[in-house]
Image (cartoon, coloured by chain):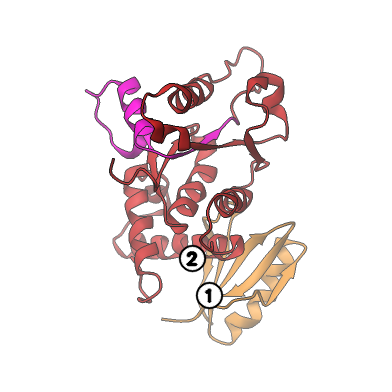
Chain colours: A red, B orange
Amino acid sequence: MENFNKNIFVNCPFDKDFMPLLKPLLFTIMYCGFNPRIALERLDSGEVRLMKIKELIDSSKYSVHDLSRIKSKGKDEYFRLNMPFEIGLDMGCRLYHPEPIYRQKRALILETEQYSYQKALSDLSNSDVKCHKGEPEEVVFEIRSWFSELIDDEMPGGSMIWDDYNVFLTDLFEAMKQNGLKQKDIDRMTIAELINKMKTWINDKATKPNKL
Amino acid sequence: MAKRYHVTKRGDGWAVKREGSQKASKVHKSKDAATKDAQKFREKGSDVVIHKRDGSIERWQKKK
């Protein structure tokens, strides 16, 4: 299985409000040397979504699940069930897959308010749960600290990752501007494009001053 | 390319930091205070990039 030990299945909301958290989450994963696998990485309308999710889960040793949308904010608003459903698939793969390698799977659960998951999904007690309070900077620190607990390799500091994420966005803004594009073009960039830009920047960062 | 100083969210405050430097030159309680403090670097020929809470660019002040 190619890159199984480096792949991280990202199970999170894709709405506009979550983008400020999703982007630093993806950046941190790549900065720490891992490979995010996310349903938005490829857009193929002919692909059955559940089979796509299955492939992402099958190919990933690690997973990050964000339960920020487990609680509806207003009257008549539906809470989102995709994330809990996909946690279930991921946990099921770990527990029931006939291949022993899947017993090595590890998952991180993120939430906005501490312990809110226990009220809605108490079966997940004793899981790795971290709270980001809806702050992009906290996402970076929480993902980074989870990696440092899991892996022996030395991880870059959370402050360094956050500062470099800000520099990456500056370089991206400058590069887009030079091509006649605007901030709204960056905002509308697909996740697949953004992942590629992040990968390039992170790989080149140490050696080249103009990174994009 | 001019040196760049960044005003970014840092915990409960806002940091002013030269790009590539290990440490922030100062962390302020408010974004306004950090933005004001960063102007001294602009006077000395650096660009100042002011970020939003999510890291995206709010303003890019070119060197004076």
**A177 with respect to A94 (left or right):** left
Q: Residues within 10 Å of mark 2 (few under 14, many from 20)?
A: many
The residue positioned 61% from the left and 73% from the top of the image is B17
Magenta segment, which residues? Answer: A38-67
Mark 1 and mark 2 residues within 8 Å of each other at the beta carbon? yes
Point out residue A21 in the picture as x, y percentages from the top left corner.
54, 44
Residue B46, given in percent of the width and then of the height, sits at: 53, 81
What residue appears at the point 77 percent right and 63 percent down from the top-left corner? B29
Q: Is A41 within the magenta? A: yes
Check disc 2 and give the amino acid type: Val
Distance, label 1 to label 2, CA atoms, is 7 Å
Tag on residue A167? 2
Query: Which chain does the residue under circle 2 lie in?
Result: A
The label number, if any, that marks residue B19 in the structure image: 1
Q: Residue at x 58, y 87 (%)?
A: B44
- Residue A9 placement, left or right of A152: left
Amino acid on which the number 1 mark rests in the picture: Glu
Question: Looking at the picture, do discs 1 and 2 lie on one chain?
Answer: no
Helix, strand or loop at disc 1? loop
